[in-house]
Amino acid sequence: IVLAAVQQDGEALQLATQELRADREVVLAAVRQRGWALQHASEELQSDREIVLAAVQENGMALQHASQELQADREVVLAAVQQDGSALAHASEELSADREVVLTAVKQKHWALRHASQKLRADREV
C-alpha cells in the first residue's frame, strides 16, 4: 500500500513507518516521484548514492538532505546543480570551489554565484 502511495506522491513517505522509510525499494520509488521525499528517508538511505542521485535528478535541492559524504561527491553535486543551481548551497566547500560545478550551477541559476568560493566569485568567466 505504501509503495503504491509513494509512486503516486513521493511525499507520502512522511506517513510511512520508520521501517518503510528504511526500505530501499519504497524510498527509491518516492524520490523518483518527488526528490524532496529524501528528507523522510532513513539516515542510511540518505547516504545511498543511487537513491540520492535519483532524488537530486528530480529536485536538485534534495541535496540538502543527503549525507555529508554525498554532498562532497562530484557526480551527485553536478546532477543536483544541473537540475537546480541553488543546490550549490548544499555542496561541500571543496565543490563550491570547483570551477565546472560552479559554472554548471551559475548557468542554471545565476544566483548560485553567491554560494561559490571567494576565488571563483572573482573569476571573470564565472
Image (spheres, rainbow, N blue to C red):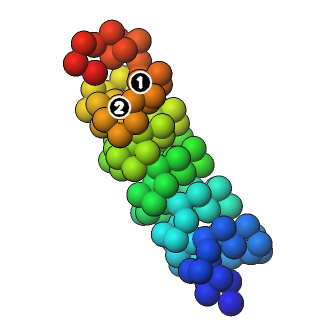
Q: What kind of element bears circle 1?
A: helix
Circle 2 residue = 106
Residue 31, numbered circle: none
**In percent of the image, x 61 and y 71: which residue is there?**
10
Q: Position of residue 61 (x, y in %)?
A: 52, 47
Quadrant where the C terminus sits is top left
Circle 1 residue = 113
Does residue 6 appear to the left or right of 75 in the view shown? right
Between residues 27 and 10, which one lies in front from this camera angle?
Answer: 10
* Residue 108 visible in this rendered orientation of the protein: yes
Residue found at the very far bottom of the displayed protein: 1
Q: What kind of element bears circle 2?
A: helix
Between residues 105 and 53, which one lies in front from this camera angle?
Answer: 105
Quadrant where the N terminus sits is bottom right
**In percent of the image, x 43 and y 45: which residue is there?**
84
Q: Are marks 2 and 1 in contact (CB under 8 Å)?
A: yes
**In percent of the image, x 74 and y 75: which residue is there?**
16
Distance from disc 2 to disc 1, alpha carbons, whole Å, reads 6 Å
Give the answer, above or below, for where 114 lies relative to 118. below
Does residue 105 appear to the left or right of 24 in the view shown? left
Residue found at the very far front of the displayed protein: 110
Among the two numbered marks 2 and 1 on one chain, the one whose residue lies closer to the N terminus: 2
Between residues 116 and 24, which one lies in front from this camera angle?
Answer: 116
Q: Position of residue 52 (x, y in %)?
A: 48, 57
What is the crowding at mark 2: few (fewer than 14 residues within 10 Å), some, or many (at least 20)? many
Q: Position of residue 23 (x, y in %)?
A: 61, 75
Q: Position of residue 37 (x, y in %)?
A: 61, 62
| Kind of residue at disc 1 | Leu
| Kind of residue at disc 2 | Val
Give the answer, above or below, for where 1 lies relative to 107. below
**In percent of the image, x 27 and y 26: which residue is there?**
99
* Residue 53 visible in this rendered orientation of the protein: no
